Amino acid sequence: MTKNRSVLSWIDEMKNLVRPERVVWINGSEEQLEALREEACKTGEMEKLNQEKLPGCYLHRTAINDVARVEHRTFICSTKEEDAGPTNNWMEPNDAYKMLYDIARGSYRERTMYVIPYSMGPVGSPFAKYGVELTDSIYVVLNMAIMTRVGSNVFDALGDSNDWVRGLHCKVDIDEENRYICHFPQDNTIISVNSGYGGNVLLGKKCFALRIASYLGYNEGWMAEHMLILGIENPKGEVKYIAAAFPSACGKTNLAMLIPPEIYKKKGYKVWCVGDDIAWMRVGEDGCLWAVNPENGFFGVAPGTNMKSNPNALISTQKGTIFTNVVHNLDDNTVWWEGLDKNPPKNALNWKGEKWDAEDGSKGAHPNSRFTAPAVNCPCISSEFNSGKGVPISAIVFGGRRAKTAPLVYQSRDWNNGVFVGSIMASETTAAATGAVGVVRRDPMAMLPFCGYHMADYWTHWLDMGKKLGDKAPKIFNVNWFRLDDDGKFIWPGFGDNLRVLEWIIKRCEDRVNAVETPIGYVPNAEDINLEGLDFSIDTLKSILEVDKELWTVETEGVTEFYEKFGDRIPEELLNQLETLKANLK
Ligand code: OXD
Ligand code: MN
């Protein structure tokens, strides 16, 4: 399939290490994928669902000890420890290779090695980066074929270049104690052992498109971000694009596929999804920031997805989708999860494959159960989704889950202030997640678990990108959909109504609306957020636009403490920004 010497010699080396019984090259053809689906159904790795109701859909269950990303077992193996920074686990690369090779050695015995050539980004696009993943899991092959662009044309585009990412995945024994997800940024290499869970083994996603790519971007002058990309079309047919970063569990996929409120729909507004998780961004020939979604599908959390919260996501899962760790409805051979509807199936298996009865109060689907759905299934997928050129970004939006501190929306004063806003991003834990409610977790740019190098150098890179972009830089905002009232209830309706806030953001980018300056940046005049068709008083709106100086003073203390972690590597500019904020609050 390729004559590329660096590819062939690495595969040979890995073959000698893991000792597969046979090697299968994945060419991306439907015929080959269909044969693999059949094989996976024979071995029990997947189950074919009701093909009338869910054509092309399958169910998979992971091992019960293997249901989520394992941050504590994820390592950045940079040559120097200080280059991984205080927010990453680090292992010395030679030690890591030795340990991983010892685990991987002979582990493909009696198994097949699948060679997956894949592209992150449309093949041939100036944004695209190529990778080869070796795996002993058909589930991985089939998921990669949804999440990335897989096929022999990747090798054609790569030619004899050595610029590609090596990925080795070995299931081994799915042993938690020996599970490692290791990144070698200096070698463009990822090795993942003892897991079968998507986030740990679909190496194109978090491992490549964020951890390795963020480091590539740092060296090559572009950005790999944990951001959704959406386009807002106004009644004149003009589309403006927004990239937005939120920590996990803040409704990123819902925002990416937002359904406009009726009143906006009537006027002719439309929202288009370019991506729901990752954005690669470069300065274009016009000097503006352009973005592509390097992925080709959605690896979304199933629970809570329904026709009300996110119809576009639900519709995306109705064909060609792999469901992982959801409930299996045995009556009609379909799937179910908490929050899909109020009718849990009576005759069903839970995510572990055990007979399950909703009445006993236990959860049927794992809270991190997933769907892997092709992006092209999404009713609101952008016409630019496959454009190699990408889309021009007007605004960057950061956000988190804050009960009180952050207003519904504010705009940073300029790019550098926006980088500061991103660097202090935080979310409060919810009762469901930990039991400890309201604990503030800093998650700069939502990249805490995904930045492949020193976080302070990453901030420097953001500041440098601002210098390159100059006055063409997107405007930077922060949103908080999650303000709570005294009874602990959400004040802002969220979901589709978030478009009202995005509309203000676009207006600010186009200089069409004034704002009020506060110590943290610009907030809207309440009158400028369109509440038409919504039962929401302007006074309540005013209350969630307020900036409480006392709460923000406490916030600056938290930020000071957080920044101390980064020592003198932290850019001077961010320390100045923090001092300015403190002064503004006095
Ligand atoms: C994800 C995450 O799975 O951010 O996308 O955790
Ligand atoms: Mn994510």
Image (cartoon, grey):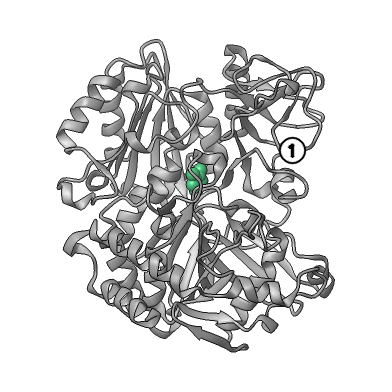
Residue 267 appears anywhere in the view: yes
For the question of whether residue 237 can be seen, the reply is no
- How many numbered marks appear? 1
Query: Is 498 on the left-hand or right-hand side of 566?
Result: right
Q: Is residue 182 left or right of residue 475?
A: left
- In which quadrant will I find the C terminus? bottom left
- Image location of residue 137, percent across then percent down: 47, 23
Farthest residue, direction top: 110
User: Which one is nearer the viewer's eye here, 200 or 455?
Assistant: 455
> Residue 75 location in percent, x, y?
28, 39
Q: Quadrant of residue 191?
A: top left
Q: Nearer the viewer, residue 514 or 155?
A: 514
Amino acid carrying label 1: it is Leu
Reply above or below: 250 against 284: above
Image location of residue 46, percent across then percent down: 61, 21
How busy is the neighbourhood of tag 1: few (under 14 within 10 Å), some, or many (20 plus)? some
Q: Position of residue 1 (x, y in %)?
A: 42, 35
Q: Which residue is mark 1?
A: 340
Comparing 466 with 301, the one in front is: 301
What residue is drawn where x is 39% and y is 30%?
134
Q: Quadrant of residue 555?
A: bottom left
For ligand 1, tell me if the residue under mark 1 lies within 8 Å.
no
Between 239 and 255, the one nearer to me in the picture: 255
In what element is the residue under mark 1?
loop
User: Does 558 sit left or right of 229 as displayed?
Assistant: left
